[in-house]
Image: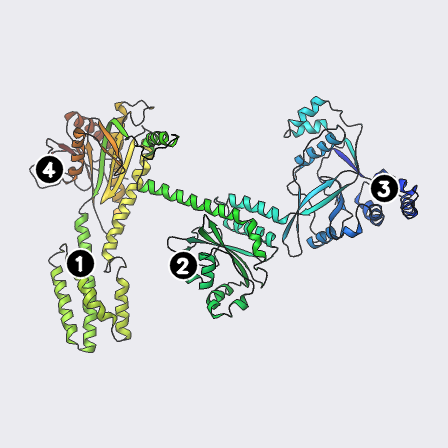
């Protein structure tokens, strides 16, 4: 060790025992012979070592005179307390310690020769200012409470980190100015007090080695390992939901619990409990493993635990400990659960229920590879940390629940950000109402004079394709069963099997006529009632058993039938919808920058969207019609991009489905109202209802005088009422044709009259799909 641990220090350090020597001189003159003789003998030995009085400046001098120094300080280090006190000579804030008590010496020895006792988290800035504050208190009679709690972190013989609080005794120290010292005024002191972070100011007022620190101090340590571990645990748990490295988090938690329980090989686990299903669940992104579940994602509690452990942990919600696993498994009722733990090298353990408001949240697991290390006695140590664990897990569950609710709101009952402010304003009136009348009636959320934009990209012939997929699945199932029944009949010659084959072939023949509404249900009822019992009671035969097992493996759990082709269709439909929805949602974020507007999207056999724009939705943004025209052009361009996205995706899908797009133009402003019963916006008023009627019927509309739909694959159909709308969209189309987004040419159509609606017209234009 060296006297100077940092490059700069306001002190020149002189370790001196002059105050002790002066006290011995007084004792030597006393009338008590044994005290006087003892003091005289010590003083005689110090006469040849003047540096003990004037000041020692090197550690070698201390080491050479260690025995004499120990005798000089005998009154301060009583022999009777040497195995109890953790005490040594020290200089405040310096890594200088010597003349250890036996207990302190043992602690240092167990830490190892390579370990250097240093103060935790004390940097040069803090060291310098705290040293300066010593001068202010000693020399300038200030009363500054300047020192934060200081700690030593020292490992024990088993490498468990122990934590010790440092207390200094400075009664034997003097602070002496030198020629380099700066005399301070009260104004200087006030300026220093207000400028802790200005290290240059402190160095100016207290230059390097401008004061002498003479004498010695004493340090007394108190073992605060448990308290420190609890504090560290709190810090770790507070950031437990962050993105820190999972392995670091595990190691940190185990290190903390090892300090608390003083067990070097202690491991920690946690198993969440789902009270709604009486199951244990693993945490998807594990920060802490589960010894109960190991690699299982979930398990019923009665399967995971035996009856005794279940009753203790789940029913009684009390701690269960096993001190000796070998003894525990000797009871047959404990054998399965005990061996499950022993397979994980667990010989003693504590399982503690985490309970909040009498509700079980999960199980904390402490385990050791040594018997009797964990037991019912040291299980009581959990009392000091359990409140932190309970609050953390409860907070974690609340955070997860909030995220779930946020996703549910976003995916199922979304309130779009553009209109959220109005809902917030209305709800705030209720929240801040002191009385909060339970019969309070919330005002309806209405937006007047908004312009609607409706568009869709529809998957063509999706119903027919779905029916063909269902028919293929049924035919495959019937064909497979006919083959199995034929083999069974060839082996057993039972006439009833010939009849079952005839019935299955009849169903297969009927399928060639098409799929009726109740065909599948009839066939499935027949198969389950007449065929499956035969298959389930077949005499074991290796060849036929494999065929039957393969057949049942092909059956979908949810429907009880073959579902391969329909699954391919569902995959195709889902992939198309997801791709197009993602593109639309991504582009929507850009569109909001044009002007804030309400937007909602629906996935059916394709993707639909509603868009409402107007001043009442964004009153701070000064709406004018140019924003509406901008959004109309944006909508047309995005539908073209969605068509191209589908075109590039189509070849990779199981089914080659086609899409067609539609835009409905409505130039009159309408009013929309949030309908509380349906949790969505809808048009308001009888006049506005005309728009909703057209929107719901237009995708099935025909070209006037024909049986052809107005929508066609690879094309966008724009339905409108007025000639100025036609002129507006012709400009957009010409622009996008110039941009190589749409193909040249425009088709003009008249739309067959809808129920209650007539006079609609349409423009149809082809998307340029194969242009890079």
Residue 535 or 631: which is nearer the viewer? 535
Residue 206 or 39: which is nearer the viewer? 39
Quadrant in which the N terminus appears: top right
Going by the image, does 81 lie left or right of 350?
Answer: right
Q: CA distance from mark 3 to mark 2?
A: 73 Å
Which one is closest to the eye, mark 4 or mark 3? 3
Q: Residues within 10 Å of mark 2 (few under 14, many from 20)?
A: some
Q: Which residue is mark 3?
A: 52
Q: Residues within 10 Å of mark 3 (few under 14, many from 20)?
A: many
Residue 178 or 512: which is nearer the viewer? 178
Q: Which residue is mark 4?
A: 703
- From what the image shows, is residue 103 above or below residue 750? below
Q: Which residue is mark 1?
A: 521
Quick one: SS at disc 1? helix
Going by the image, does 511 lie left or right of 296?
Answer: left
Whichever of callouts 4 and 3 sits on the residue coming sooner in the sequence is 3
Q: CA distance from mark 4 to mark 2?
A: 60 Å
- From what the image shows, is residue 326 above or below residue 416? below
Q: Are marks 1 and 4 in contact (CB under 8 Å)?
A: no
Residue 542 visible, this angle: yes
């Amino acid at each position: 060790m060296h006297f100077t641990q940092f490059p700069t220090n306001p002190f020149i350090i002189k370790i001196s025992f002059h105050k002790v020597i002066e006290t011995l001189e007084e004792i030597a003159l006393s009338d008590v012979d044994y005290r006087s003789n003892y003091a005289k003998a010590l003083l005689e030995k110090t006469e040849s070592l003047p540096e003990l009085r004037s000041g020692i400046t090197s550690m070698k001098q201390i080491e050479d005179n260690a025995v004499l120094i120990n005798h000089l300080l005998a009154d301060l280090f009583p022999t009777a307390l040497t195995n109890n006190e953790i005490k040594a000579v020290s200089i405040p804030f310096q890594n200088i310690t010597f003349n250890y008590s036996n207990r302190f010496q043992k602690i240092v020895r167990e830490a190892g020769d390579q370990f250097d006792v240093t103060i935790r988290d004390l940097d040069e800035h803090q060291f310098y200012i705290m040293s300066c504050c010593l001068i202010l208190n000693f020399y300038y009679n200030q009363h500054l409470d300047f020192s934060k709690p200081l700690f030593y972190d020292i490992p024990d013989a088993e490498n468990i980190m122990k934590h010790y609080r440092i207390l200094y005794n400075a009664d034997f120290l003097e602070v002496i100015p030198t020629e380099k010292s700066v005399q301070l005024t009260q104004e200087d002191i006030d300026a220093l007090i207000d400028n802790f972070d200005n290290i240059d100011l402190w160095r100016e007022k207290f230059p390097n080695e401008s004061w002498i620190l003479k004498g010695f101090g004493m340090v007394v340590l108190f073992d605060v390992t448990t308290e420190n571990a609890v504090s560290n645990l709190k810090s770790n748990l507070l950031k437990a939901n962050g993105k820190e490295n999972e392995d670091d988090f595990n190691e940190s938690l185990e290190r903390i619990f090892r300090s608390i329980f003083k067990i070097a090989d202690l491991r920690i686990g946690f198993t969440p409990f789902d009270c709604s299903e009486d199951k244990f669940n693993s945490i998807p992104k594990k920060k802490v493993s589960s010894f109960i579940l190991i690699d299982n994602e979930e398990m019923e509690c009665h399967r995971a635990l035996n009856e005794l452990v279940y009753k203790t942990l789940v029913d009684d919600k009390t701690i269960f400990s096993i001190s000796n696993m070998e003894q525990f498994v000797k009871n047959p009722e404990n054998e399965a659960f005990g061996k499950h733990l022993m397979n994980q090298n667990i010989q003693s353990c504590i399982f503690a229920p985490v309970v909040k408001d009498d509700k079980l949240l999960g199980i904390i697991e402490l385990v050791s590879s040594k018997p009797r290390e964990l037991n019912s006695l040291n299980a009581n140590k959990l009392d000091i940390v359990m409140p932190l664990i309970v609050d953390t897990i409860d907070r974690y569950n609340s955070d997860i629940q909030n995220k779930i609710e946020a996703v549910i709101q976003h995916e199922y009952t979304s309130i779009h950000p553009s209109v959220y402010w109005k809902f917030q304003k209305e709800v705030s009136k209720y929240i801040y109402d002191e009385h909060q009348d339970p019969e309070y009636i919330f005002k309806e959320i209405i937006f007047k004079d908004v312009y609607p934009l409706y568009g869709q990209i529809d998957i063509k012939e999706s119903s027919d394709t779905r029916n063909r997929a269902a028919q293929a699945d049924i035919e495959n199932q019937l064909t497979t069963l006919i083959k199995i029944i034929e083999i069974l009949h060839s082996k057993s010659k039972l006439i009833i099997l010939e009849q079952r084959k005839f019935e299955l072939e009849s169903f297969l023949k009927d399928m060639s006529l098409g799929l009726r509404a109740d065909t599948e249900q009839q066939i499935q009822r027949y198969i389950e009632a007449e065929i499956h019992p035969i298959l389930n009671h077949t005499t074991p035969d290796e060849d036929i058993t494999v065929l039957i097992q393969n057949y049942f493996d092909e059956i979908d759990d949810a429907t009880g039938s073959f579902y391969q082709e329909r699954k391919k269709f569902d995959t195709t439909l889902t992939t198309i919808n997801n791709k197009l929805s993602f593109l639309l949602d991504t582009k929507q974020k850009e569109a909001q920058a044009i002007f804030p507007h309400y937007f909602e999207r629906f996935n059916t056999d394709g993707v639909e969207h509603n868009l409402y724009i107007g001043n009442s939705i964004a009153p701070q943004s000064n709406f004018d019609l140019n924003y509406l025209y901008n959004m109309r052009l944006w909508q047309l361009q995005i539908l073209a991009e969605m068509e191209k996205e589908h075109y590039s995706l189509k070849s990779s899908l199981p089914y080659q489905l086609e899409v067609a797009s539609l835009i409905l133009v409505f130039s009159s402003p309408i009013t929309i109202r949030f309908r509380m019963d349906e949790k969505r916006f809808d048009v308001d008023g009888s006049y506005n209802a005309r728009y909703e009627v057209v929107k719901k019927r237009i995708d099935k509309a025909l070209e006037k005088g024909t049986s052809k739909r107005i929508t066609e694959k690879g094309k966008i159909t724009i339905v409108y009422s007025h000639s100025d709308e036609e002129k507006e969209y012709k400009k957009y189309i010409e622009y996008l044709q110039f941009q190589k987004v749409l193909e040249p040419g425009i088709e003009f159509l008249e739309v067959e009259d809808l129920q209650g609606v007539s006079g609609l017209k349409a423009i149809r234009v082809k998307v340029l799909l194969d242009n890079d």
